[in-house]
Image (spheres, rainbow, N blue to C red):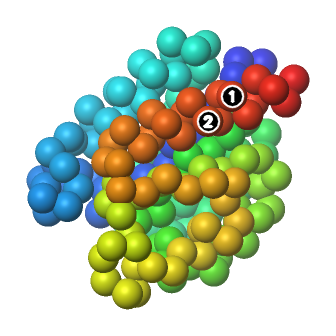
Amino acid sequence: MNAKKILVINGPNLNLLGLRQPEVYGSTTLAELEEHCRVHGATMGFEVDCRQSNHEGTIIDWLHETRGTSHGIILNAGAYSHTSVAIMDAIASVERPVIEVHLSNIHAREEFRHTSFVSKVAKGMICGLGTTGYMLAIDALVDMLEHEK
Ligand code: DQA
């Protein structure tokens, strides 16, 4: 791995960002969010690869792939955060720092959103700050990775 790389993974339904419940998730589209992430990472010399999938297995495959290709991961697993032991196990196996992000404050919403399997294995978690949360997660990962050297 030469260039410093961060992988941003957005999970199910986040392809509809900007259109889906904008009162909860905001009006920024996924394409705009991904561009902000790439630009923000680039200002600190990091390449940010952004991906989105509605499929649990694809997200798991991408997490496995990071073993040799990314230095850190930002993951908004959407509703899978509350259900997927398989994604939790994949995170535990990647040996790279994973920061969990949610646009909305999952603790201020329905009870079933209060538990996250991702949180059990993530390095840290940011929720409720909208798309700003992704930028803060990039800052945190960059700081972590710079001090790792
Ligand atoms: C979400 C919160 C989840 O509960 C929900 O299922 C999502 C989006 C968020 O970013 O706030 O799809 O992860």
Q: Is residue 65 visible?
A: no
| Residue 138 shown left or right of residue 14 in the figure | right
As drawn, is 36 to the left or to the right of 66? left
Callout 2 amino acid: Ala
Residue 86: image quadrant is bottom right
Q: Please name the residue that numbered disc 1 is placed on.
A: 143
User: Residue 63, how many percent across, how many down?
Assistant: 65, 54
| Secondary-structure class at tag 2 | helix
Location of residue 11 in the rendering, given as x and y in whole percent from the top left corner = 42, 60
> Quarter holding the C terminus?
top right
Badge count = 2
**Which x, y percent locates residue 128?**
36, 56
Depth check: 114 or 73 in front? 114
User: Mark 1 near mark 2, Cβ–Cβ under 8 Å?
Assistant: yes
Tell me, yes or no, if residue 75 can be seen here: yes
Residue shown at the point (55%, 33%) measured from the top left? 138
Q: Residue visible at 35% across and 27% down?
A: 35
Q: Is residue 92 above or below residue 136?
A: below
Residue 80 at x, y percent in the picture:
47, 73
User: Which residue carries the number 2 mark?
Assistant: 140
Q: Residue at x 68, y 40 (%)?
A: 72
Q: Which quarter shows the N terminus? A: top right
Residue furthest right as drawn:
149
The numbered disc on residue 110 is: none
- Beta carbon at label 2 within 8 Å of ligand 1: no
Amino acid type of the residue that numbered disc 1 sits on in the rendered structure: Asp
